[in-house]
Amino acid sequence: MAGPTRPDTSKECMAMTPFEHAGLTLGSHFQPIYSLAHRRTVGVEALLRAEQHTSPLSPADAYALVTTPEQRHALDMAVCQAHANRFTQLPYNADRWLFLNVDAASLSRPERAATLLNTIRDLGLEPSSVVLEVLEHVLQVDEALIESVNLLKKAGFLIAIDDFGVGHSNLDRVCQLEPDLVKFDRHLLRSAVSQPRTRNLLPRLVHLMHEIGALVVEEGIETETDVLVALESGCDLVQGYFIARPSPVPDQDTAITPRIDSRWDELMVRNLLKRKITRRQIELARQSFVQSAIALMQGTPFEQAAMPMLAMPDVIRCFLLDSEGRQLGRNLNSQQAPKSTAPKFAPLADTTGAVWSRRSYFQHAIDQPGVLYMSEPYLSMTDTRSCITLSMAIEIDEAMHVLCADVLVKRTSR
């Protein structure tokens, strides 16, 4: 992907390469971006290390010294040139992406995007080896921006939305830009580590980005717990101090992979135990469900036929649908269920006559009579608990019905 490496790849050689722009000395550090599936580094993010009169400046302070869009774009091109030049000096840059942070000013006009394209090509880098990171919440999505992004995509660049999940993140902006990658803000991971609800939400956010067509990078991986949360979320790539700290020459995978593997092994052991417990619980529920279905087909009243299911500890309720998905009668709640629904959800408690024909558990059951179907976990409208639904289409009095049972999905202990 990148051009051939140069013979001298020492840190000293790279540190001596001067890059100056508007009174600033522009330096580069690189931080690995690691693929959990490939078990290797697939890219590095270039991070600005700027100085003014030997005094260090943060990237934000460096860009604050320039005010007009033209000046920000000129500084941006100098920074990209410095990063790209040093990237070609890395001893192992082949088959790795260079992640470059790009200022919004450089994308606000197509002619500036063209300058970025030419700057990268002039340095001998293929655009397909470069990921352009843009801050989603500072972009003003208009025709000029879309034109600029499309120009860069057509040239072969990959586009990454940076810091998604912070501030005024807007899913519509992400859909409009159609990025190749989305980088979740580190604060989203911090929240997932400390708050069970966010931790349960994180895999769904990852899945949503996959549906959009983007790979997910989770930033801010700083501890062993962070690695476990990232692994559980199903994200694709990770970045952070636990993986490797920024450096003029980043760590190699011989140092990174053992740290990840130890967390992976722990997660596999935990998941294996969880799957064993879940399989046993589901199998018992399936056996009871079939027993109830047979009783119904033999003419046993619903309340009596449902008793084997309702006796299971994780079963919430049973209910019966007609061939159109309309609920017949009330829910039959298990003895373990709360005696009354919380007042704030009382309007949802009575589901008599409700139509569930759009639910996957009804559609799959009615399409394959006699086959037991188990849904994916979802939030129940009846009492807002997370559950799965077992369902099967059966004949009762020569008419097709669908028997359903909601089974509680327990939150795992953290």
Image (tube, helix red, strand yellow):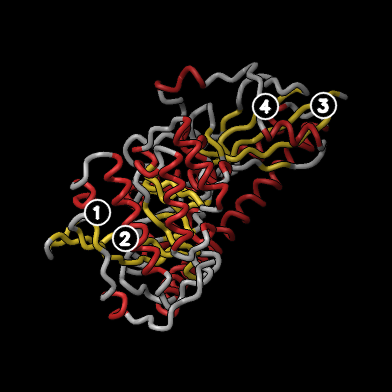
Judge depth for marks 1 and 3 and give the one in front.
Answer: 1
Q: CA distance from mark 1 to mark 2?
A: 8 Å
Using a 10 Å C-alpha cutoff, classify the residue at mark 4 as few (fewer than 14 neighbours), some (14 to 19) or many (20 or more).
few
Q: Is residue 298 above or below residue 223?
A: above
Residue to which mark 2 is pinned: 47
Q: CA distance from mark 1 to mark 3?
A: 67 Å
Q: Along the polypeptide, which appears first: circle 4 or circle 3?
A: 4
Q: CA distance from mark 2 to mark 4?
A: 49 Å
* Residue that appears at 31% across and 49% down: 74
Judge depth for marks 1 and 4 and give the one in front.
Answer: 1
Residue to which mark 3 is pinned: 400
Residue 358, numbered label: 4
Q: Is residue 187 above or below residue 173?
A: below
Label 3 sits on what residue type?
A: Met
Judge depth for marks 4 and 3 and give the one in front.
Answer: 4
> Is residue 383 or residue 243 the one in the foreground?
243
Residue at disc 2, secondary structure:
strand
* Residue that appears at 50% across and 68% down: 2
Residue to which mark 1 is pinned: 59
Provide residue 350's location: percent of width, then percent of height: 55, 19
Label 4 sits on what residue type?
A: Arg
Q: Is residue 329 above or below residue 271?
A: above
Q: Along the polypeptide, which appears first: circle 1 or circle 2?
A: 2
Residue at disc 1, secondary structure:
helix
> Is residue 372 or residue 236 the one in the foreground?
236
* Residue that appears at 47% across and 69% down: 41
Task: Tell me, yes or no, whether the two marked residues, 1 and 2, touch with CB atoms within 8 Å.
Answer: yes
